[in-house]
C-alpha cells in the first residue's frame, strides 16, 4: 500500500469548505500508486480523486495541473482539476500540496488488444497537438540529465554484466541526444509515463489518460516510445507484438503524421524509453524513500526490454 500521508473524513470535511463540491461523504485510500497519496472521495456533487503530492513542490505543480486543465478544455480525455473558491488548483493539506480532480470512468486494460492500442495512439497524438499552445514550460525531470545523475548512484549495486549494459547505453544515448535529427524532433508537453495502468477504458472505449505527474516538455517521439514499450509487448519477454505496434503507431500517424526525422530516431528512442524506466526502477529499489509501505517495480523487466530493443529492430513507425 502506498498511502504516505493519512487523510481522515474530518480532514476532508475541512478541506471541502474551500471547494464548490458540497459536503464530504466518504474517503478511501488507493493502494496501487507508488509516487503520491491518492484517495477516492465522495462528495454531495459526485466522485473525485484527491492527491497529496509526496515529492513534487508547490512551485512545480501548476505545470501538471494547468496542463491537465488545458488538455481537458481541448477535448483530450484527462481528469479535470477542480479549482477552489479562490481559483487555486493546488492547495495545502497536512503541509503538502494537494489537488482534487474528476474521477475517470472505467478501469485499466491490462491485456490490451490492437483496438485498445489504436485508441491510445490516436488520443496520444491528439494530446500532443493540443499541447502545442500550452504556455508553461518544464523539462522532463526524468530526462537525460536525471539519467546522468542517477547512473552513478545505482551502478555500485549492479553486477558487471548489467553495469556494462548501463554504461554502454548511457554512452549510446548521449551520442543520440547530440545528433542532428534528434534536435529536429517535434517537442512539447508529453505525459512521459503512459503505461497501461495510467489509462482508463470502459470496454474498448478509452475514457482518459491520468497520472500526469511525470509530464514535462520533451520529444513527442519519446512519449510514443514509452507507450509502445508498455502497451505493445509480451510482458514476460518484452518482445514487441507487431499487430499492437502497428495499431498504435498507425492510429497516431493518422492524427499527427510522423516526420522523416522521427522515423530515423525510432529505434534509438525505444532504447531510450527502456533505459529511462530501467534506471528509475533501479533507483526506487536501491535508493528507497520512506513510506508506510512501498513495493518497488521490478527493474529486470526493463533490463530485458532494453536488451531486446538493442538486439531486435522494432516494426517501423510507418507501414
Ligand atoms: N482521475 C482518476 N480517476 C479514476 N481513478 C484514478 C484517478 N486518478 C487515480 N486513480 C486511481 O488511483 C490509482 C493510483 O493513481 P496513480 O496516479 O497511478 O498513483 P501514483 O502517482 O501514486 O503512482 C490508479 O491506478 C487509479 O485506479
Ligand atoms: N510507470 C513507472 C512507474 C510510475 O508508476 P505510476 O504508478 O505512477 O505509473 C514504472 O512502471 O516503472
Image (cartoon, grey):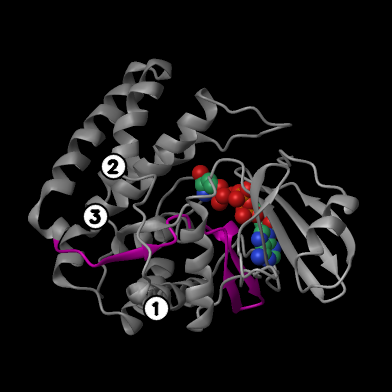
Q: Is 198 included in the stretch rendered in magenta?
A: yes
Tag 3: Cα neighbours inside 10 Å, few (<14), some, or many (≥20)?
some
Q: Secondary structure at mark 3?
A: helix
Q: CA distance from mark 1 to mark 3?
A: 26 Å
User: Residues in magenta?
Assistant: 184-213
Q: Quadrant of the N terminus?
A: top right
In the picture of the structure, the residue carrying the numbered disc 3 is 267
- Measuring from the top left, give residue 12's x and y in whole percent: 83, 56
For mark 2, give the secondary structure: helix
Q: Name the N-terminal-most of marks 3 and 2.
A: 2
Q: Is residue 41 visible?
A: yes
Are the residues flagged by discs 3 and 2 in contact, CB closer than 8 Å?
no
> Residue at point 34% right, 37% down?
146
Mark closer to the chain start, 1 or 2: 1
Front position in the image: 187 or 21 = 21
| Residue identified by numbered label 2 | 144
Q: Nearer the viewer, residue 291 or 198?
A: 291
**Above or below, comparing residue 116 to residue 187 in the picture:** below
Question: CB of residue at label 2: within 8 Å of ligand 2?
Answer: no
Q: Please tell me how crowded label 2 is: few (under 14), some (14-19), or many (20+) other residues with Cα within 10 Å.
A: some
- Residue under circle 1? 130
Element at badge 1?
A: helix
Spatial separation of the CA atoms under disc 1 and disc 2: 25 Å
- Position of the C terminus, as image quadrant, is bottom left
The answer to whether residue 108 is left or right of residue 143 is right
Q: Mark 1: give few (<14), some (14-19) or many (20+) Cα within 10 Å.
A: many
Residue 140 on the magenta segment: no
Q: Is residue 9 above or below residue 169?
A: below
Q: Nearer the viewer, residue 10 or 27?
A: 10
Residue 83 % position (x, y): 64, 70
Amino acid at each position: 500500500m502506498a498511502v504516505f500521508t493519512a487523510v481522515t473524513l474530518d480532514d476532508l470535511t475541512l478541506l471541502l469548505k474551500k471547494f464548490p463540491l458540497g459536503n464530504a461523504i466518504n474517503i478511501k485510500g488507493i493502494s496501487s500508486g507508488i509516487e503520491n497519496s491518492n484517495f477516492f472521495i465522495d462528495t454531495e456533487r459526485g466522485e473525485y480523486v484527491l492527491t497529496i503530492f509526496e515529492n513534487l513542490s508547490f512551485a512545480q505543480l501548476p505545470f501538471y495541473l494547468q496542463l491537465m486543465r488545458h488538455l481537458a478544455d481541448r477535448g483530450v480525455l484527462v481528469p479535470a482539476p477542480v479549482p477552489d473558491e479562490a481559483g487555486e488548483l493546488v492547495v495545502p493539506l497536512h503541509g503538502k500540496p494537494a489537488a482534487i480532480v474528476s474521477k475517470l470512468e472505467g478501469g485499466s486494460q491490462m491485456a490490451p488488444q490492437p483496438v485498445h492500442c489504436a485508441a491510445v495512439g490516436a488520443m496520444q497524438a491528439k494530446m500532443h497537438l493540443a499541447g502545442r499552445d500550452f504556455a508553461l514550460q518544464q523539462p522532463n525531470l526524468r530526462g537525460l540529465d536525471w539519467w546522468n545523475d542517477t547512473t552513478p548512484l545505482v551502478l555500485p549495486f549492479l553486477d558487471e554484466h548489467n553495469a556494462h549494459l548501463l554504461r554502454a547505453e548511457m554512452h549510446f544515448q548521449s551520442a543520440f541526444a547530440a545528433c542532428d535529427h534528434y534536435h529536429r524532433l517535434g517537442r512539447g508537453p508529453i505525459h512521459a509515463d503512459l503505461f497501461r495502468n495510467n489509462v482508463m477504458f470502459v470496454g474498448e472505449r478509452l475514457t482518459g489518460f491520468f497520472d500526469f505527474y511525470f509530464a514535462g516538455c520533451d520529444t513527442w517521439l519519446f512519449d510514443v516510445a514509452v507507450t509502445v514499450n508498455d502497451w505493445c509487448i509480451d510482458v514476460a519477454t518484452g518482445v514487441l507484438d507487431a499487430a499492437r505496434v502497428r495499431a498504435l503507431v498507425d492510429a497516431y500517424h493518422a492524427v499527427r503524421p510522423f516526420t522523416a526525422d522521427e522515423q530515423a530516431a525510432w529505434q534509438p528512442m525505444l532504447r531510450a524509453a527502456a533505459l529511462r524506466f530501467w534506471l528509475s526502477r533501479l533507483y526506487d529499489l536501491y535508493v528507497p524513500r520512506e513510506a508506510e509501505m512501498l513495493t518497488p517495480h521490478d527493474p529486470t523487466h526493463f533490463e530485458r526490454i532494453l536488451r531486446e530493443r538493442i538486439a531486435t529492430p522494432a516494426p517501423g513507425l510507418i507501414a
